[in-house]
Amino acid sequence: MKSRRTPAVSPLPVWAGGLGALALCFLILPLAFMLGRVNWATLGATLATSEARDALGLSLRTCLMALGVDLLLGVPAALVLSRSWRGVRAARILVALPLSLPPVVAGIALLAAFGRRSTLGALLGGAGLDIAFTTTAVVIAQVFVSLPFLIVTLESALRARERGLDEMASSLWASPSRVFWQITLPTVLPGLGRGAALALARCLGEFGATLTFAGSMQGVTRTMPLQIYLARESDADLALALGVVLLGVAALVVALTETPWGSVASLVRSRLSSTRSGCGSASGVASGARAEGSLAADPESGIGDSGDDASAAAVHVAGTVNERGWDVDVQLSPGLVTAVVGHNGAGKSTLTQVVAGTLRLDSGRAQIGERLVDDAATFVPARRRGVAMVSQAPCIFTHMSVLNNVAFPLRVRGVGRAEACAAALEQLHAVGIADLAHKRASDLSGGQAARVAIARALIKRPRLLLCDEPTGALDYETSKEMLSLLERINHDLGTTIVIVTHNQVLAEMAHRTITVRDGRISDVEVREDPALASSLTW
């Protein structure tokens, strides 16, 4: 007996299905009738004319050049627009404005800017660079109308990605350029692919701006849309044939927007991961690993040495963050576990952000050891502070393997691949997940990801470890394992640890508990004999 399938989602209303089908028919029928009118037997001969060849070749060349310019300019623009800064909303409106302009108006605007009678055009002409009514003008017109498609699509992808990845990479010694190439770009490849496909499709169909700004000269500015427009009056067969060709090319380009870019991105990401921060097989790096459970520092090794006053982990912050109403004066003693507690929004995480270097004080100063890291005249970025971070969201780089995640800080510092991977495997042994070394980070459970984050932080050999709600996304048993691991790190390495939490029970394992309330330090409690992590119950 044939089984009935249960719908995976709520069924559509009847009216929605009917109107949706009508919309599809409305869009498909004109194209179908156009295909039906083409004389397929003579299509090849029709397209063999010099006018058709010149128009097709010019369109392909200019569209590819325009796409290159779109990528060169659009990717940085999307990065800028994805950030929060004064006036960003107005900038987004201006970038999207060409999307709503009639193509002819776009051509008039370009002519006003670059035409021979314009101030800029006259200056360029004096330098021997006439733009209007040249092939260059065609490319400029295509860029003007297509660039917003790339920027808007990519900017949306950038804002939708997991938060905190770039900040985490920066705290792992990565420069802004390295963060872009190895972290940001691989995570937005699907959005970039769709944006590029939409921009290319717009270039192919551009007509009005090109005609107004570049004119219609065969072999110079007459693209496929212009040739179709001219042929429509004198040679209907040629117009239909060119229309079919343009339809086919456009269909191919538009189909790229539905390409499984996630799979393509995964392939590219794996290649980027293996070539830039990659590690080979486990057998190739296992020889450098110590016995499981070892957390002992190696003072004679240069691997992971921050070089940023790492021997001093005392912290003093006395300053304000006006936007958050935050004003504290607090000292963190070296070699101890300090718990920072308080309700949500009290200002706990602000303290870790200020210490880590992801948030700057509006006034006051922050000091790590003897080194001033933040005041009115000085600001040391996160990558140069020698501070390690572990957050509630582990911020694992899902396009990398587990081993490459942990090796990332050392590869950033220029440590050789074999040495970095051996050190990474050693840290994975220490946190008990060496068997996951070559597993994709995207396939990890919450507890496994948290351990990877700890191993990645430890490989820096920090003297200060900031843990912002480290058990927030973990179950009870995994949370206790995480706390026991932090306890071992403090005991074996003497690492200063700051645990930000709203769970008062967790604070019992700390030597000091700092209570934050409404952006102020309200209480400081000192414990001579903190509780063991294994004894905590909540």
Image (spheres, grey):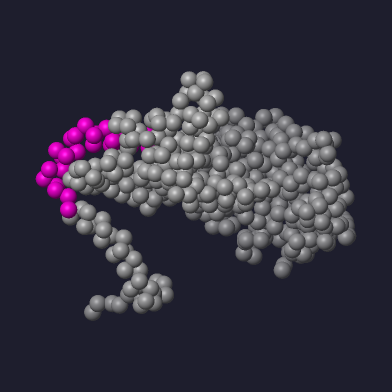
Instruction: Tally the marks.
Output: 0
> Residue visible at 62% across and 51% down?
89
Relative depth, front residue between 246 and 228:
228
Quadrant (top left/top right/bottom left/bottom right) for the C terminus? bottom right
Q: Residue furthest left?
A: 41
Taking the spot 24% from the left edge, 45% from the top edge, the residue there is 232
Queried whether the magenta region covers residue 88, the answer comes back as: no
Residue 415 locus on image (x, y percent): 59, 30
The answer to whether 220 appears left or right of 444 in the picture is left
Does residue 86 lie above or below 300 as drawn? below
Whether the magenta-drawn stretch holds residue 48 is answered as yes
- Name the outermost residue toward the front: 117
In terms of secondary structure, what is the magenta stretch mainly? Answer: helix
Q: Quadrant of the N terminus?
A: bottom left
Whole-percent x and y of residue 318? 87, 47
Quadrant of the rendered structure where residue 316 is? top right
Residue span colored magenta = 37-63
Q: From the viewer's side, name the closer residue of 106 and 423.
A: 106
